[in-house]
Image: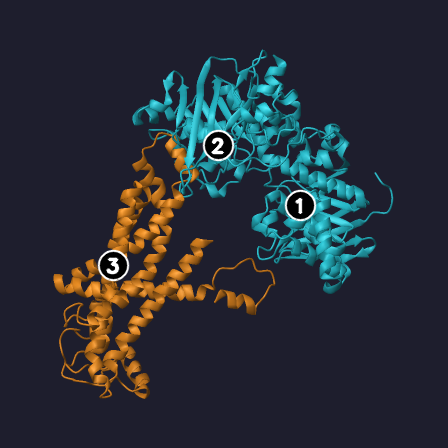
Amino acid sequence: MSEMLEALHPPPAQVARPMPPALFLLGCGIVALSLVMMVVGPWIVPFDPGRPGPDIGMAPPSLGALPALAWAVLRGLPHAPVHWFGTDETGLDVFSRVVAASRTDVAIAVGANAVSLAFGSLLGLAAGTARPFLAGLLMRVSDLLQAFPVFITGMILVTMAGRSELTIVLALALLYTPIYIRLTRAEVLAQRHRGFVDAARALGRTELWIALRHILPNALTPALIQASVTIGLAILMTAGLSFVGAGVRPPTPEWGLMIADGSNLMVQGEWWPSLFPGVAISFTVFGYACFSNGLERYCAR
Amino acid sequence: MPAETPILRVRGLTVAFGGERAVAGFDLDIAPGEIVGLTGDSGAGKSTLGLALLGLVRPPGRILGGTVELEGIDVLALDEARRRRIRGAKIGLIVQNPRASLSPLHPVGQQIADAYRTHEGGTRAGAAARAVDMLRVLGLNDPERRVHAYPHEVSGGMAQRVLIAMALGCGPRLLVADEPTSGLDVTIQAQFLDDMWQSARRVGSAVLLMTQDLSIIANYCDRVVVMQDGRRVEDAPTPRFFAAPAAAYGRTLLSLRREAPPAGGDGPVLLSVRGLRKVFPLRRGRKVVHAVDGVSFDIHRGETLGLVGESGSGKTTVGRCLLRLVEPDGGEVTFDGIDVRRAAPAGLRRLRRQLQVVFQDPFDSLDPRWTVADIIAEAIEDRPDPDVLARLLRDVGLDREVARLPPRALGLGDQQRVNIARAIAVRPALIVLDEPTSALTPLARVGIIRLLRDLQVRLRVSYLFISHDLSTVAHLSHRVAVMYLGQIVELGTRAQIFDQPLHPYSKALLAAHLVADPSRRRVDQPQAEALAGESPSPIDLPPGCFLAGRCPQAEDSCRAARQEVAVLADGRALRCDRVAAALA
């Protein structure tokens, strides 16, 4: 993107400018919104996302009717309850469920990444500093984990340990830990021969102290950048697992589940129960991708 | 100086980057056959000026005004197409980092030939023959074969000569050389500059040589121009510049000449190294690299031992072995009566605090995430008193304000001062200084040398000063050891080594060394001590003397017998049986 812009607008006098911050700012906005919704989403929705209402399979208001409805709601005029995204075939409000589902999806993705980042960076540090034999063993085990088709591993784990949010977090964490091990190890290998590491050794610091105080903090940057991409991917993964029936339990508001439930109705012309959660997923994943891209450029400078 | 009309005549040249003037109203004349040295601290605008002479400027900058007349034609007034014809044909440019300036995809001969044909035309075959001629003129053996080599297949010295061949191929009237020898070993640097000096004198072209190294200027330049903040602050014939520099820049750099190195170095023995050996196994096969091979020396309390040698001679490995940052494979290291090699981990950690180290790259040696205060505090076990910190900073000539800053906010010279502060914080008896000044600008280097001398007097600390730069070693060392391929070939007092070297390698090293003194120019002296060829690989070392293949005085016995160290009557150690026998 920035290369294109530079090609279109050659000098006057540009010193290697970083990516136009518009996309990065958009990414920041989406990431922030997703995190806020994760916390407050279920509390601010207009309908209870778990209790069916009387309207079954109701279409969202037509585009023409939207301005009048919005006006009525904003002015606090008396009005019938609005199902902005319609209702599904059990009478649940799609809008409330899409908003409430961000707690499930984003929390699982963030949790899984926090767990795998913590374990992955420590194991990566170990793999980068341990004796060659142990380091080799650790890397081969993580290769083995990575070599399994991600979806199948996830399905097996969830089937064995039961369908709960915690199981999914652990399944995803297991899948993503090797990524962090590999990234951290590569950076540790680069950092451990830096001058300040030898200088600390010359000051009589122990190897463990040096590893934790000098090497690890300087080796974390790539892993942190990776985390913002992986959170986006983990949201896709969580939804995907639900879609194939290996994710969270059905009544829970969750984007993948909603798409799966609504997919049968698509052929009958009821597009709204599937489309809106799908848009929510794309929007969130895109936001995390923009965020990580901008972060990477910022750190590379 | 030749009084004829100048080849280059620059008037009021001004180049600006945004609001800042990198070159401000610069005037410069260069006569035919004249070599002018342009010097000044980093950021003075030397490189920008050099490019502007060709009508070039790095993107954000703009040439605001002035004239650059080359034999009466104003280069800046020409349109781009005509200017391009002048570049290369009438102005040759040699930049830093020769290998990066060559295209890795084409043989070097073709690149020389292409540059020639671009300006002179002619047939492909004619240009190829011209490339071979150029390389032969520049003293390359077997140019017919070498023209087919790719840039990655040639040595740094040869890559630099290919660049000169490209720059001189069309017989330019003006040659602009920007730090042409930075990153080259001294022997190759001397060869290159000799070549350039001779070709300029032969064809009578003008040369503008940009360098921060005053010894290069003393040896090869007729006139010195000092640049500061884009302005010319001094313009003097070389002898006058070295006798009485007018600008502060030259005065500071040359001030060290008049100061004797600190006295001392006669205390009891502090560190004793005997038969130190270190081999690095190669990844493939059973062969090993002999990095350090039977090195022995003593360092006394309050003394500086200089360890010199070219890159790859193993001098850095010696320093790292003393602290056991790499484990030696053999030999004895005794520090203050303690056997360093047999020290247990806890004892070693205590020992290391007596034995500190300062590395070459100051920025790499400071944790980028820590502040200066944290970095120095790391050396002190307990929570440091702000006054202790301030005193340490003052000892190394820094403000107490810098304590709050991250290392990247400091210049390289100040970063090295922080490294030194961390090293002296534990009150060590010996500091291994591993090329502490080679990453610095000459101005910062002078400051660090002063600081090291001053600290030695005040703290009675000993130094092992490792460097490839003989001038710096001369400023600091009481005794000097010369290393070649992992062995010390000669060890003696500073006067012995610098004034009367005995080993053929020491002689060659000193002959290649440029002294910042225009009355002792290398080009005026006979070149008898040059060594042939390049160092053998440290993997397959010859059975006899390692230097035998290159030494002009080698005899059959040198090639057969491994050379042992002999201690001569005047106290110096020498690893050359032939010379030792002749003196005995």
User: What is the crowding at mark 1: few (fewer than 14 residues within 10 Å), some, or many (at least 20)?
Assistant: few
Q: Residue furthest right?
A: B4
The color scheme shown is by chain
Residue for badge 2: B316
User: What is the crowding at mark 3: few (fewer than 14 residues within 10 Å), some, or many (at least 20)?
Assistant: many
Name which residue type carries label 2: Thr
What is the total number of numbered labels drawn onto the structure image?
Answer: 3
- Visual hue assigned to chain B: cyan
Please tell me if label 1 and label 2 are on a single chain: yes
User: Please, what secondary structure does the residue beneath circle 1 have?
Assistant: loop
Name the disc covering residue A175, or none.
3
Q: Position of residue B276 (x, y in %)?
A: 44, 24
Taking the image as drawn, is residue B344 in sight?
A: yes
Q: Position of residue B154 (x, y in %)?
A: 59, 47
Q: Position of residue B416 (x, y in %)?
A: 50, 35
Chain to which mark 2 belongs: B
Name which residue type carries label 3: Leu
Q: Which chain is orange?
A: A
